[in-house]
Amino acid sequence: MSPARKRGILIGAALAVVAIVVAAVVLLVKEDRAPAAAVGAGESTANTQDSPAQVAGRFLRLFDTGDLTTAPVDDPAAATAALTGTRNALNGASVKTSLGEVPTTPGDAPSTSATFHAAWTFPGGSVWKYEGKLDLVRNAGKWVVRWAMSVIHPKLEAGQRLAVAPVSAKPIVADRDGKALVGGDAAGVAPILQGALSKVASGENSGTGATVTVSRVDASGRPVETLFGQAAETDKPLVSTLSVASQNAAQKAVDGFGGSAIIVAMKTSGELLAVAQNGAAGNQPKALSGLYAPGSAFKIATATAALQQGGVTADSPLACPGSEQIGTRTLKNDNGFDLGTVSLKTAFAASCNTTFGRLAKQLPADGLAKSASQFGLNADFEIPGLATETGRVEPSSSGDEQVEAGIGQGRVQVSPLGAALMAATVATGKPVVPKLWQGLETKVNAGYQAPPAGVLNQVRAMMREVCTTGTAKALKGSGAVFGKTGTAQFGSGADANGWFVGYRGDVAFAVMLEGSNDSKPAVQLAAKFLAG
């Protein structure tokens, strides 16, 4: 064979080999592309190599959409129909699932399972969470989910379905008698306290907060079991010391007044019963933290100081002139009345400014501050949910300042809460800690000690006379009321607040009217509150 022919044969052979290799490459590319083209037809076509975890994950993604017609499940039509019915029954609630544990499965295993987490969100914000389970089986060599109603919820059985109903309105916060203060039928109750009550309840009540209940029911619709929204111990309302009856009576009294009006009432043990103020008083809780000159209502503290430090008794004879200059201050009685010489008890009942200015001038510089502290007016309490001030009474820096303080003017400041606390202390003879909750304690940052029993016995007799023959005798028809009126100038002195501070039985209270210029309207509101 010639060299040329040999070269031709070799070249031909080489070309043949190249052709075979090229053909093989083309064939491999086509075989690689064919399955990819088939998968592009839709997510329902699973590769025989898909793991149980991949299949379960794809099923859950479609479950969340509500359409299982293309899902890897052995009965897509039945699954879609059941899921559609469930979503309709749950009032269009949306569901979000996430895959849980999927055990490792041997290559020849005929079945396995996977867990998942479901969260249904209802209109109104309630969220129902639970753990579900998927059973997976091989079908024509591919893993698919075996359909059953238990896929929707693990407790659902064949022939059963889910049903939803609104939760019966129940209180989040209840009063001392179990009546609703927040939630339930509490609309309009204790408006000034709604924010504080709700805030504390949201932090203390660990219930589900469900607005709906979900039950599994049988074919006839009869409930078999409540799966979500069932009341538990933790769903019980937080209980306040307030009384809906007392609160409504106080609110009605202040709402009927034309100007700014506030009432605070408490058990003499300290449990708050009512905190009410009207629209004219604004939306800040002045009842609990607003500080005002108490006027003659402070004579409770002045009389107590005189009984302890001034060497007088309730029956001591004292002068009550219509007007008197004490130091550089000139004090006048209301309308200039002059009683001559009367007992301390009578001067207290008539509210003689001249008598009490002189008594105050004779006290030590810290005498009134000490007496005020014995009624809790310099105490400091932390009531859960409330910002409170009881008062601020400091030692006098001059004789003139002390004269003013003796009739509740000058730098003396008291809140309506503090005034009610003062009345409660007189009534019970013990230091009183204000409370708003049953089970949540008030923190005492600075406590106090009440005046001696012998002193308080005389103060009670004086406060009773105020309501029988004195400035609050309009309360004679309101039962055995003990109290003290007050009119306190503020600002330029052209206007004054009206007060009545007192107690009846085991209820102590304070009425404060901004700018009423007289205590008589406060006495009238006290009568309305007590009647309610």
Image (spheres, helix red, strand yellow):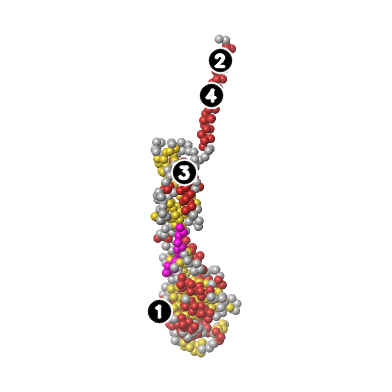
The residue pinned by badge 2 equals 9
Residue 524 x %, y %: 51, 80
Mark 1 surroundings: few (<14), some (14-19) or many (≥20) residues within 10 A: few
Foreground residue, 113 or 305?
113
In the current view of this chain or complex, which residue is farthest to the front? 220
Task: Determine the residue positioned at 45% across, 50% down.
Answer: 118
The mark nearer the N terminus, 2 or 4, is 2
Foreground residue, 524 or 419?
524
Foreground residue, 99 or 410?
99
The mark nearer the N terminus, 3 or 2, is 2
The residue pinned by badge 3 equals 76
The residue pinned by badge 1 equals 453
The mark nearer the N terminus, 2 or 1, is 2
Q: Amino acid at mark 2?
A: Ile
Real-space CA distance between mark 1 and mark 4, rounded to the nearest whole angstrom: 115 Å
User: Mark 3 or mark 1, which is nearer to you?
Assistant: 3
The residue pinned by badge 4 equals 21
The mark nearer the N terminus, 1 or 4, is 4
Real-space CA distance between mark 2 and mark 1, rounded to the nearest whole angstrom: 133 Å
Task: Determine the residue positioned at 41% across, 40% down.
Answer: 137
Foreground residue, 492 or 191?
191
Residue 526 x %, y %: 49, 78
Q: Secondary structure at mark 2?
A: helix
Q: Is residue 424 magenta?
A: no
Q: Are marks 2 and 4 in contact (CB under 8 Å)?
A: no
Q: Are marks 3 and 2 in contact (CB under 8 Å)?
A: no
Q: Which mark is residue 271?
A: none
Task: Determine the residue positioned at 42% across, 38% down.
Answer: 138
Real-space CA distance between mark 3 and mark 2, rounded to the nearest whole angstrom: 63 Å
